[in-house]
Image (tube, grey):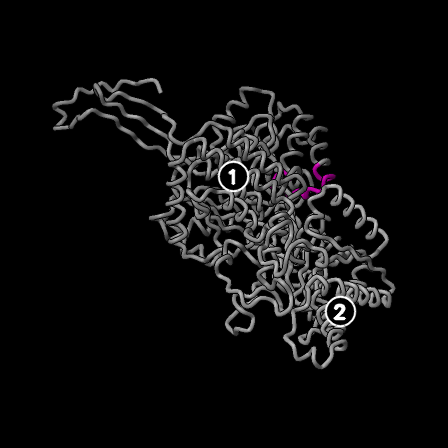
Amino acid sequence: MDRSRAFVKDVKRLVVKVGTAVVTRADGRLALGRLGALCEQIKTLNSQGYEVIVVSSGAVGLGRQRLRFRRLVNSSFADLQKPQVELDGKACAAVGQNSLMALYDTLFTQLDITSAQLLVTDNDFRDRDFRNQLSETVKSLLALKVIPIFNENDAVSTREAPYEDSSGIFWDNDSLAALLALELKADLLVLLSDVEGLYSGPPSDPNSKLIHTYIKEKHQGEITFGDKSRVGRGGMTAKVKAAVSAASAGIPVVITSGFAVENIIKVLQGECIGTLFHQNAHLWAPIKEIGAREMAVSARESSRRLQALSSHDRRKILLDIADALEANEKLINSENEVDVASARQAGYEKSLIARLALKPGKISSLANSIRVLANMEDPIGRVLKRTQLADGLVLEKTSSPLGVLLIVFESRPDALVQIASLAIRSGNGLLLKGGKEAKRSNAILHKVITTAIPENVGGKLIGLVASRDEIPDLLKLDDVIDLVIPRGSNKLVSQIKNSTKIPVLGHADGICHVYVDKSANMDMAKKIVLDAKVDYPAVCNAMETLLVHKDLVHTEGLNEIIVDLQTEGVTLYGGPRASSLLNIPEARSFHHEYNSMACTVEFVDDVYAAINHIHQHGSAHTDCIIAEDHEVAEVFLRQVDSAAVFHNASTRFCDGARFGLGAEVGVSTSRIHARGPVGVEGLLTTRWILRGSGQVVDGDKGVVYTHKDLAN
């Protein structure tokens, strides 16, 4: 199913508008075959539990054809020689309505379906009581599986033909259908026409192309409409107006051919036929493909415009994004469900699917995190240090955005939201490349976020890289991209580090250790070890190696930890000492990140041996000691050279949100610039601003340096 048609699975009530060109043939007579096929479709839908409401044109044309025949029969030869006066349209409507409804009634009766006629005028809808009664009547009819058939009561309408003013509450049966869809809370409006849908030009022109999804921003002004309907009042122009009106109010609309068999059923099956109008259509607009350099340059230009805004305006962008995510939650989850289903079908591992899925409440959680970030102190332009260099010469060290970031991440679409919000808060331009398994989720999240960014900054602030093939080109742009942050597998990070001159911030491995000292409280140790391994084994801050003091080998406390890990489903591998003492398979390597329900266990002589083991085999990510001996704990905290070192706390706390950073773009094990979870501050550098009063260096003869620290 095309992603733009995914909404049809939730459709229960639909309004079907049948145009005059569908109801009648070219000679003005009724098109019995088409009407019969239409009624059969409605019968099928009725039996499947759909609530179908019909709006039918054709009464005036049918009445005119019958009255012309009647006038011919009743006229003398002399009468026929006189100029023929055009028949009164209201009389035609009165006669035609009777005939049209009689035909519908006959056809539906043959299909064991009951139909009902409802004639309305424009003025009726000015009365609130009428509208309430109309809804109640239709509700009762649908509950009885009766098909309500609406038509404008042209016989008594106060508007005069040819109704070209397009004024009033509705002005033709297309706008009536849109009004009824809204009034009766329909889930879908189908406008049947004599062509396949909306074309870029007259359908008779071979150069015209069918538009599958109408996007107002893209198609308005680009479409050339042909002639009005050969028989009806509106034609395609009227249908488009009605469709745009209904779609903007939240009711999807499909314009499709009433000549083709079973087109309504095909629409409800999600087939990409006709032209769809949807309030989210602008979010589905394909991203214009641009080159890697152009994308990076555009991100830099937009970031400079973002930095020029006031703190209040930058904050508002984040709040607008949070609101937009919640407003589009249903659409985002729908796209994510398709990604998850595709991943399952492709046979991806359960751990990847778990990272891919946006669980219930996730969008609200992300939106709230963005609001927390928005309400933090503005990080841009903060004065970090102020120094008086000389009299009347003041130097300020200020916080400043890095420029343009390239983030490559795998699996987790929520990472896109976190990264984008951090980039905006820190004033940086951003290029994003997510995993192919999250293609739909990433595309809709990117669209929602960039649509919420005001035009004076521009949606190109955040670029979404469509293909992995573009990554090598981007990695060559060290003159326009300032930092690369890879979030993913060891292989991904290593490849990027070996492929670019651009600084890379990240970690190749997440080999986290928990060392249980002989002084440890074993009940505490059991809780921490289980949490560090079992809570979320696929992430980089999960425990991969359990180091245990040798004096705990045969203790009940260690035995409970081992049994509990195995009970939770953790596969244990041992170092040379642990494998024989615990009778478990020997690990192939101590430098191994499982990312699953498995870990390595080894015994060490003391805290110094534990530190040496971590330095020799670890990845400088997050390491923890569990100990009641505070001197031993301090040795561990001071000497372990990792980005995050914990005492009596799970390694799972190494996270930007848990650290109070709002979110993170990743965890850095680099010793240059940011280290550990990288939040807003890790995406900033510094600038020097000097304020003088005409001073010149002149060999330093005329300047008396004071280098006095001033209050910020």
Which quadrant of the figure contains the C terminus? Answer: top left
**Circle nearer the N terminus (2, 1):** 2
Mark 1 residue crowding within 10 angstroms, few (<14) / some (14–19) / many (20+):
many
Which quadrant of the figure contains the N terminus? Answer: bottom right
- Whether residue 117 sits left or right of residue 351 in the image: it is right
Front residue of this view, candidates 136 and 80: 80
Which three-letter amino acid code belongs to the residue tagged 2?
Leu
Q: Determine if residue 505 is in view.
A: yes
Can you name the residue that lies furthest to the bottom here?
77
Which three-letter amino acid code belongs to the residue tagged 1?
Gly
Residue span colored magenta? 565-578
Q: Quadrant of residue 563?
A: top right
Front residue of this view, candidates 469 and 17: 17
Q: What residue is pinned by disc 1?
A: 618
Point 60% across, 31% down: residue: 650
Point 74% across, 71% down: residue: 67
Residue 248 at x, y percent in the picture: 60, 49
